[in-house]
Image (tube, rainbow, N blue to C red):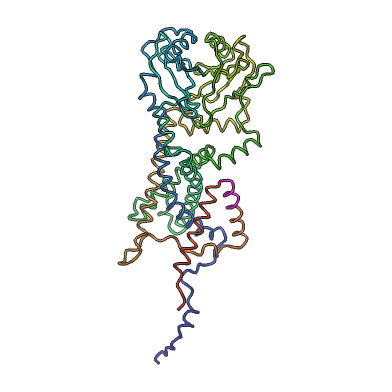
Amino acid sequence: MSRIEIPMSQTALDRALPPEDADPPRPEPARLRPLALRLHFYAGLLVAPFLLIATISGGLYAVAPTLEQFVYRDLLTTAHTGSALPVSDQITAAEQARPDLGVVGVRPAPEPGDTTRVLFADPALGESEKRAVFVDPSTAEVLGESTVYGSSSALPMRTWISQLHRNLHLGEPGRIYSELAASWLWVIALGGLYLWVGRYLRTRARNPERAHLLTPDRGATGRRRTLGWHGAVGAWIAVGLVFLSATGLTWSKYAGDNIGEVRQSLNWTTPSVSTVLGDAPADHGSGGGHDGHGTAAPVTADVDPAAVDRVLDAGRAEGLRSAVEVTFPATSEAAFVVSEVRQPWVFSNDSVAVDGATGEVTDVSRFAQWPFAAQLTSWAIQLHMGLLFGLVSQLALLALAVALGTVVVRGYVLWWRRRPTRTGSRPFGSPPRRGTLRRLHPAALVSAAVVAALVGWFVPLLGISLAAFLVIDTVIGVLRRPRTP
């Protein structure tokens, strides 16, 4: 008996077949994956250029302290390693070289063979900049002078790299680029890690031999091989990227202000010594920041150089190490400040205030007595700047920058290989499919919206750019929606 086939109408056929984008029922956490994939795609595509610029400049910034020692070795070192003359004599020699400027501080030579750095306030310089005269401590010979910047007293090359990393030499408007990159870096890193771990778990459930989490699948080819390197390298550096994002945001314009308010309310700010002598008001702190961004060099009162020797002796008696900076008082009624300079493998920086007339210590700030959050902040700043572990931390940051650069480039390669290859098709790769929000449970959708709003308020550039992504994506979806004839 032959089989009789009954034709079906198109309407009945449409009802019988599931739609192409239908998903099998999945638990709610699994439904977040398409949303995370779409967010990771758009953020990586649109923010990655800023990340790449910050990565290249950040890698240079990490090794800048070591490069500085080599480039400016004629100013920073001397062949004489004999006994050092009193610091007051060295200051006098520097004043004779620049009688038109006022001394605001001095960094005595920390080790034999190093030079002393006498700091002057120069009205012709910009914010946070000073004029440094370098003196041979054994002979009081002036070896030269240069502009220095910030609390780290960075020389011109390191300053140029720092400003490139911070604002692309565009001033305050240029800071938007670095804040945008730092705002999205942790989102992209954690989102990519979530996607990669999920992919690993699904692959292990189907074919354990093909599951690779921390290493790429060397047997893969084409796009799968690129994805393997992209995900594995990203998994290795995810923690470092979150650290760079968090510390970078503390120096940003908008999110940095919010972080500062939180630190202030929780008493996590960096303590400083008081320079008040008697009832006289003074304004001298020992705090520092990202290369000392912030204030201009203060104008000091006329100070007898001999007082600096008394101040240094008092600081040594309080246990301060050899690498210190003496900051001169702004008025004759204020105290000197002696602060330990950030050095590799030195995890505490104490400061003391000293009466220059008597050599009496009037206030002390011990790093060991700081709030733990303030200590963590100080260590994080030094680690981000490549100073905490010296060359070790600088090479680690450089390796992190190189790894991030490869992840960004491979991300664009994945996007390029996602493009259709048929004639007349789109020239670029298409984003992950739409409709991810509609598949979420209303409670999950509301929770995601609340979290996004709170994070967007605290990190404004993240919130503004995320809203822009949503608007652009909505407009593209409307334009591509097929019209009913």
Give the residues drawn in magenta, as a range: 451-459
Seen in the picture, residue 35 relative to 138 is either above or below; the reply is: below
Provide residue 100's location: percent of width, then percent of height: 46, 16
In magenta stretch: residue 39? no
Provide residue 240's location: percent of width, then percent of height: 48, 40
- Quadrant in which the C terminus is drawn: bottom left
The residue closer to the viewer here, 384 or 457, is 457
Task: Describe residue 403's horizontal placement relative to residue 340 as left or right.
Answer: left
Q: Residue furthest right?
A: 279
Task: Describe residue 335's horizontal placement relative to residue 475 as left or right.
Answer: right
Seen in the picture, residue 21 relative to 317 is either above or below; the reply is: below
Corner quadrant of residue 158: top left
The residue closer to the viewer here, 411 or 336, is 336
Kindly report the secondary structure that dominates the magenta region of the rendered protein. helix
The residue closer to the viewer here, 198 or 176, is 176
- Quadrant in which the N terminus is drawn: bottom left
Q: Residue furthest left?
A: 423
Provide residue 125's location: percent of width, then percent of height: 45, 26
Provide residue 341's location: percent of width, then percent of height: 51, 22
The residue closer to the viewer here, 119 or 67, is 119
Seen in the picture, residue 308 relative to 365 is either above or below; the reply is: above
Seen in the picture, residue 99 relative to 448 is either above or below; the reply is: above
Q: Residue at x 46, y 52 (%)?
A: 43
Q: Residue at x 50, y 17 (%)?
A: 102
Q: How many marks?
A: 0
